[in-house]
Image (cartoon, helix red, strand yellow):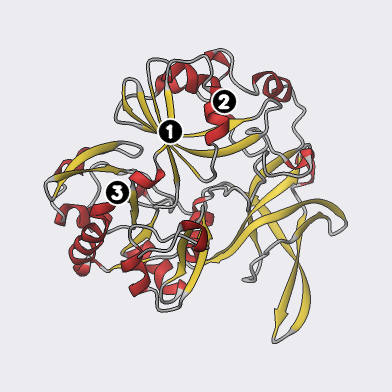
């Protein structure tokens, strides 16, 4: 007999029987109330598999909302900063949504399933806010997270693996598109999306298909180097891809104790997601004012001398004036560079010629301080042509 949910500190995902058997390290973390593997064998093995072969990541804990009804489009256009009306059926859009003062509440992906039906995938739970915002609209908002089991299949051999699975209709699937495919007498949704910055897919199934789907994918990927991947390796991939992560690079506005900790889309470098031509949306007035030049911060990529990751380091101009801090950092094995994502104070463009980062490094229980040069560089740090190639190559 299963224990009641209130006696289970973290719930198992539909793939738990498989992920637990594969997890040699017993390193787990909590994600949206579910157990999520941090590392199965070695972070390095999993990272290199994602960049040279393929990996499976259990995406099931991601929060998923179904939004359906005749007013779905005007409702979503009221909430989202981008113009949802431009999203066609069969496509997926990356999007953010803000509070009344223009600070980001969360980011996520929006699937258009039908003319009046959407699936919103997010990191955090927003059901009360989404339902309150639906007052006056003819639609239904429901949390359907438990109706889906989801896997991220990422890496250069991912297309060869879905071919081996018999999903032949995916040859013409472009990035940020999705298709329904037949699987064991049922249907799956396969989207060309992911958080790795590489060629890859996300596969959405019913929970009762989860174990067979895992087994079939692992069997199909045996000749292509497929292996499970945990969140620690995914963190390295997303930094190389230049993606921002809530609660790591920025604080979602509804999580912040101090109002000043919120960040706007412009401050996060996501101004391209703000469409002022579509009419009113939540936070529009504040974002219009900010567009005139009142932003406080800007996010940049950094290339740092040496090979010591600049985790949580401070950034100085000419070694003296503090102008920002590192939010995410790593030594990139693929790029052979010491890279970081950083938040700088806005209006410091004239100071970017002489930047230094202060790194605190522990060597055998002894702390050392390094002051090394860094330079602002474009993101993403890693952007292989295979990510966008259509049809993809079957490596």
Q: Quadrant of residue 53?
A: bottom left
Measured as percent of width and height from the top left, residue 322 is found at 84, 53
Q: In the structure shown, which secondary structural element does the residue marked by tag 2 occupy?
A: helix
Q: Earlier in the sequence, mark 2 or mark 1?
A: 2
Name the residue that disc number 2 marks.
132
Q: Which residue is mark 1?
A: 142
Asked whether 370 or 314 is in front, the reply is 314
Whole-percent x and y of residue 308? 65, 71
Q: Nearer the viewer, residue 155 or 124?
A: 124
In-image side of 330 versus 194 (left or right) = right
How far across and how far down the image is residue 74, in percent? 47, 16
The x, y position of residue 14, in whole percent, is: 33, 57
Residue at x 78% of width, y 36% of height: 347
- Structural distance between the alpha carbons of marks 2 and 1: 12 Å
Against 17, is 272 above or below?
Answer: above
Q: On the rendered structure, is 346 left or right of 308? A: right
> Does the image show residue 302?
yes
Which class describes the residues within 10 Å of circle 3: few (<14), some (14-19), or many (20+)?
Answer: many
Determine whether 390 is above or below 136 in the image: below
Q: Quadrant of the C terminus?
A: bottom left
Q: Quadrant of the N terminus?
A: bottom left
Q: What residue is at 19 percent from the left and 69 percent from the top?
A: 223
Cα distance, mark 1 to mark 3? 21 Å
Which residue lies under the disc numbered 3? 203
For marks 2 and 3, give the CA distance.
31 Å
Q: Is residue 165 above or below residue 298?
A: below
Q: Is residue 339 left or right of residue 314?
A: left
Callout 1: SS: strand
């Amino acid at each position: 007999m299963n224990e009641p949910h209130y006696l289970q500190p973290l719930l198992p995902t539909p793939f738990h029987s498989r992920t637990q058997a594969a997890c040699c390290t017993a390193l787990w973390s909590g994600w949206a109330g579910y157990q999520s593997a941090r590392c199965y064998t070695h972070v390095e093995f999993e990272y290199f598999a994602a960049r040279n072969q393929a990996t499976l990541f259990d995406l099931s804990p991601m929060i998923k909302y179904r939004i359906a009804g005749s007013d779905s489009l005007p409702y979503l256009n009221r909430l989202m900063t981008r113009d949802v009306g431009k999203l066609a059926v069969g496509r997926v859009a990356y999007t953010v949504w803000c509070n009344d003062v223009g600070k980001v509440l969360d980011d996520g992906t929006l699937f258009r399933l039908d003319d009046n039906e959407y699936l919103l995938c997010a990191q955090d739970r927003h059901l009360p806010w989404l339902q309150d915002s639906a007052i006056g609209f003819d639609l239904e908002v429901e949390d359907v997270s438990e109706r889906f089991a989801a896997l991220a299949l990422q890496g250069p051999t991912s297309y060869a693996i879905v071919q081996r699975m018999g999903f032949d209709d995916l040859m013409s699937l472009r990035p940020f598109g999705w298709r329904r495919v037949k699987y064991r007498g049922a249907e799956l949704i396969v989207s060309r999306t992911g958080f790795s910055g590489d060629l890859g897919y996300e596969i959405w199934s019913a929970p009762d298909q989860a174990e067979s789907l895992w087994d079939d994918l692992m069997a199909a990927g045996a000749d292509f180097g497929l292996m499970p991947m945990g969140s620690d390796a995914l963190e390295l991939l997303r930094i190389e891809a230049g993606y921002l992560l809530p609660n790591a690079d920025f604080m979602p506005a509804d999580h912040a104790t101090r109002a000043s900790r919120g960040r706007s889309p412009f401050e996060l470098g996501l101004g391209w997601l703000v469409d002022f031509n579509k009419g009113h949306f939540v936070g529009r007035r504040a974002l219009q004012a900010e567009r005139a030049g009142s932003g406080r911060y800007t996010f940049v990529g950094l290339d740092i001398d040496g090979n010591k990751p600049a985790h949580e380091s401070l950034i100085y101009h000419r070694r003296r004036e503090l102008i920002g801090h590192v939010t995410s950092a790593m030594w990139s094995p693929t790029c052979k560079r010491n890279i970081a994502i950083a938040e700088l104070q806005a209006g410091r463009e004239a100071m970017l010629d002489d930047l230094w980062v202060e790194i605190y490094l522990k060597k055998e229980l002894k702390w050392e301080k390094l002051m090394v040069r860094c330079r602002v560089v474009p993101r993403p740090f890693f952007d292989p042509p295979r990510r966008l190639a259509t049809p993809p190559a079957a490596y």
